[in-house]
Image (cartoon, rainbow, N blue to C red):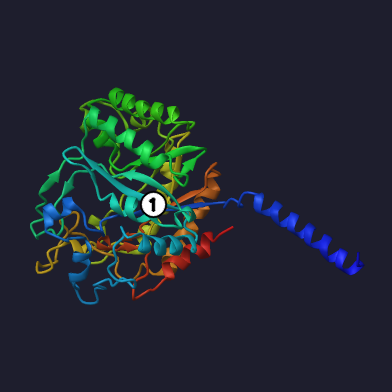
């Protein structure tokens, strides 16, 4: 054998073996996990058509939004246009944009109402789950079990017709949990913490009120966890959204002296988080027509350690919100002159810059570092809440700068 050729041959074998060994190793784990809420109301849904007319999506409100005061940054114009999120071609593009910029998880706002079952599910089931690259991201559910009101759009009187109730019966809960385990938890890229599927509820008080007592609500959650274990998982990671979850709200729902802490214990809550900045930052005291994004950052970064220390054994995952402007959900011809409660609120109007957003991300990262939690998780609002003024998808004015801010702080391994 020629010495030179032999050396080359054995060198190639060695390199091939090393390469295969490297490929066999699991991908390095990121020090932090970044999850973002996904609001799936940008595809045609049969129930929406019943309420709003054929072909309606929330893009209809984005398109007609207009400035409500001098200097108001409306309309928001998506760089990608008014696309159909239930199309896997578009979902593929979304997944790549998120994964390329340090996002690890889409938390889908997920709906199931007693009268008609699922609502707005096709963005997840026909879009994300059919996308050929969906393994680049994990996904999870945040059950948005609030009453659904007609705020699309809302008149000056702020009258909001309730279209359906968020409470569910025990029999419906049984159906819901079976569906979730079979269709979502068993997906290989469903988000799990310590092997346990992550599941969040938006209005915990509404869930408790559905069953009439903490004991019955706790039993309902235990039933869910028992099913999860039977399906082969070590348990359920239950997350509560703290929006509106207080001692007073629990007591009002149950007409007794139960506390929020009692509720968390009964439901075996593993973690808490917020949906957006507005629980810790009171818009009713923020001025009109604009509110301060920096004040919202300060209020929330001050709130995190308070709530993080209040309930020992429960991790708190800080929320960073990109923006707030709900004026697209208002009747555009009505005057905009006073606070009436949601959605008639002041807005963040230009001071929520990508640089300011990045500074909030840095604070959230520092908080989870300081708490030394086992799981370093930060949750963002939102991927596509266009009509609430909180979106990370590219927009004509700022392009991809908000996505780049996430990558700057959290990056990739």
Residue displayed at 89% across by 69% down:
4
Front one among 349 and 105: 105
Where is residue 71 shown, x and y percent of the image? 24, 77
Q: Residue 102 versus residue 205: which sits nearer the camera?
A: 102
Badge 1 marks a residue whose secondary structure is helix
Q: Residue at x 26, y 45 (%)?
A: 111
> Viewed as shown, does residue 51 lie left or right of 1?
left
| Residue 290 coordinates in the image, percent (x, y) | 25, 66
Residue linked to disc 1: 129
Q: Height in image: 330 above or below 366?
A: below
Badge count: 1
Residue 54, compared with residue 139, is above or below; it is below
Q: Quadrant of residue 218?
A: top left
Q: Is residue 109 left or right of residue 342?
A: right
Q: Position of residue 396 (x, y in %)?
A: 34, 75
Category of crowding for the residue at label 1, using alpha-carbon neighbours closer than 10 angstroms: few (below 14), some (14–19), many (at least 20):
many
Q: Nearer the viewer, residue 354 or 308?
A: 354
Q: Is residue 281 visible?
A: no
Q: Judge whether residue 278 can be spotted in this image.
A: yes
Residue shown at the point (50%, 60%) measured from the top left = 102
* Quadrant of the drawing holding the N terminus: bottom right
Q: Where 88 sits versus 280, above or below?
A: below
Indicate the quadrant containing the C terminus: top left, top right, bottom left or bottom right: bottom right
Q: Position of residue 151 (x, y in %)?
A: 15, 55
């Amino acid at each position: 054998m020629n010495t030179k050729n032999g050396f080359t041959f054995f060198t190639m074998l060695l390199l091939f073996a090393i390469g295969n060994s490297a490929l066999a190793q699991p991908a390095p784990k990121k020090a932090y996990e970044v999850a973002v809420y996904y609001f799936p109301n940008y595809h045609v849904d049969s129930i929406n058509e019943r309420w709003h007319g054929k072909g309606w999506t929330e893009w209809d409100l984005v398109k007609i939004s207009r400035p409500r005061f001098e200097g108001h940054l409306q309309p928001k114009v998506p760089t990608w246009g008014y696309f159909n999120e239930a199309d896997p071609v578009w979902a593929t593009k979304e997944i790549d944009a998120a994964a390329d910029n340090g996002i690890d998880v889409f938390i889908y706002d997920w709906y199931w109402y007693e009268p008609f079952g699922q609502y707005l599910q096709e963005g997840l089931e026909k879009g994300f789950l059919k996308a050929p690259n969906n393994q680049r991201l994990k996904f999870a559910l945040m059950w948005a079990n609030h009453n659904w009101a007609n705020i699309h759009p809302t008149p000056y009187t702020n009258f909001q017709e309730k279209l359906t109730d968020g409470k569910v019966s025990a029999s419906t809960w049984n159906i819901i949990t079976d569906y979730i385990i079979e269709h979502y938890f068993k997906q290989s890229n469903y988000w799990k913490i310590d092997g346990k599927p992550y599941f969040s509820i938006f209005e915990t008080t509404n869930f408790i009120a559905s069953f009439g007592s903490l004991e019955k609500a706790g039993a309902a959650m235990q039933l869910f966890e028992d099913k999860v274990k039977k399906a082969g998982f070590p348990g359920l990671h239950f997350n509560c959204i703290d929006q509106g979850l207080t001692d007073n709200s629990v007591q009002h729902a149950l007409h007794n002296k139960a506390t929020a802490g009692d509720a968390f214990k009964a439901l075996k809550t593993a973690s808490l988080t917020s949906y957006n900045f507005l629980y810790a930052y009171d818009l009713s005291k923020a001025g009109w027509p604009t509110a301060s994004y920096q004040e919202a950052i300060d209020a929330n970064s001050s709130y995190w350690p308070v709530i993080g220390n209040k309930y020992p054994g429960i991790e708190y995952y800080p929320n960073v919100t990109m923006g707030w402007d709900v004026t697209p959900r208002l009747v555009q011809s009505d005057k905009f002159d006073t606070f009436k409660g949601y959605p008639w609120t002041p807005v963040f109007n230009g001071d929520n810059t990508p640089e300011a957003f990045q500074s909030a991300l840095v604070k959230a990262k520092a908080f989870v570092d300081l708490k030394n939690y086992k799981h370093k998780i930060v949750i963002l609002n939102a991927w596509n809440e266009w009509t609430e003024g909180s979106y990370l998808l590219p927009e004509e004015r700022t392009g991809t700068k908000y996505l780049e801010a996430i990558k700057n702080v959290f990056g990739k391994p």
